[in-house]
Image (cartoon, rainbow, N blue to C red):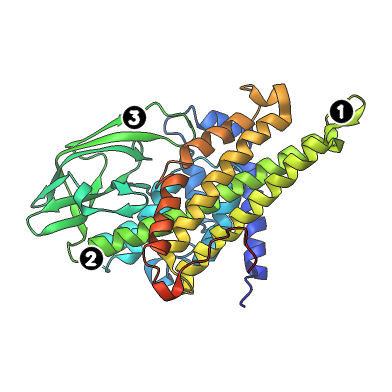
Amino acid sequence: MAEFKFTDEQNQLRDAVSKFSVDHFAEDKIRALMESDPPFDPKVWARLGGELGVLGLSVPEADGGVGGTLVDQAVAIEELGARLACGPFFGTVYLAIPALVAAESAAARDELLGDLVEGRRTAAVAVVDRVGVFDPETVSVTAEGDAVSGTVNQVVDGGFADVLLVAARGPDGVALYAVDATADGVDRTPLATLDLTRSEANVTFTNAPATLIAGPDAAQRVLDHALQVGAALLAIEQVGAAQHLLDLSVEYAKTRLQFGRPIGSFQGVKHRLANLLVDVEHARSTAYHAIWALSDGSDDAELSTSIAQAVCSAALSHVATDTIQVHGGIGFTWEHQAHLYYKRATTNAVLLGSAEEHRDRVAAMVLDSATVDKVPWVADGTAV
């Protein structure tokens, strides 16, 4: 069987992004950014794109990107996720850039993609999904000529993004449009969210001028690709955050004394941390398998991304909860970083479908298509 290994270049990329994250996304800076308007530093964002080139790692060089792979992009996202990096990663890197890469080349598409990759502009995707899948039936925004009208609720990064990619229904079907968020006819209402590092907004379009990105013949394919890549990268982000929390908990268990002994020496704490390690490694395997499947088509990408989301959402939620338990009283306080990760875990767990919804989707894809001569084996306690 093939074995996945990171290349020397990818390990160097990991080190560079990790160092950048430590310098620019330390806990005190994250707390300041999440209370600011916009909730990120545009100068740091521009450096991520123009200097480090991590916003378009998987974008072909012909489109202004680095020309790397989706695995390269995932390596960077894992390190950024470990620090809860503030910025429109979900809207811009996870969804908008993959959508534009999948769309056919055109002047408007090429210009926008170049700006996003270089960090000159940011984007959000105003599309309703069902368990991470685009369903044209959910589209309520209408298009008439070069203008769109309608409302999309709970758009991640929608409150401050420069450009909004929106699916709208016209006379020929559903198409994907780009709308300047500062244009007349665009009204954005910020929402009070649990996770202050990941904002959302309700967006209303009233005859807002729009530019066609993908017509009715291509919109489904473009958005399906974007949502699959988005789900895989979100899973990678969850892995990064879970690994950071595990490291934090292990270090605390080594130094926190109780009855004259480090609490990590007690069997109950040992077992808890061991279980968390299993969760993190399981999540990492499923997340990178999904990235791998999307990169080279070695497996069913739709199935792989759903498995990754089901596993990684549950893993980060478990790790975040147990991190608070390991830290005891201090873990419950506003002053400790554990609550920031707990809130991110809770928010991420419902983006692009919950773990329960993805497990149900996996069951439908695997079991509903099973044939009589190839029925999946289910353990029943009897000898094989």
| Image location (x, y in percent) of residue 172 | 9, 59
Q: How crowded is mark 3: few (under 14 residues within 10 Å), some or many (20 or more)?
A: some
| Image location (x, y in percent) of residue 318 | 60, 40
| Pair 2/3: label in front | 2
Residue 93, can we see it?
A: no
Q: Name the residue under label 3.
A: 190
Question: For numbered disc 2, what is the local secondary structure?
Answer: loop
| Pair 2/1: label in front | 1
Label 1 is placed on what type of residue? Leu
Left or right of 108: which side holds 361? right
Residue nearest the observer in this picture, 137 or 158: 137
Label 2 is placed on what type of residue? Ala
| Residue 123, placed above or below residue 114 | above
**Screen quadrant of the C terminus:** bottom right
Question: For numbered disc 3, what is the local secondary structure?
Answer: strand
Q: Name the residue under label 1.
A: 257
Residue at 48% in and 46% down: 45
Question: For numbered disc 1, what is the local secondary structure?
Answer: strand
Verify CB contact (< 8 Å) between mark 2 and mark 1: no
Residue nearest the observer in this picture, 344 or 108: 344
Q: How crowded is mark 2: few (under 14 residues within 10 Å), some or many (20 or more)?
A: some
How far apart in space, not on screen, are marks 2 and 3 (Cα)?
31 Å
Residue at 62% in and 71% down: 4
Q: Mark 2 points at which residue?
A: 218
Label 3 is placed on what type of residue? Pro
| Image location (x, y in percent) of residue 348 | 47, 42
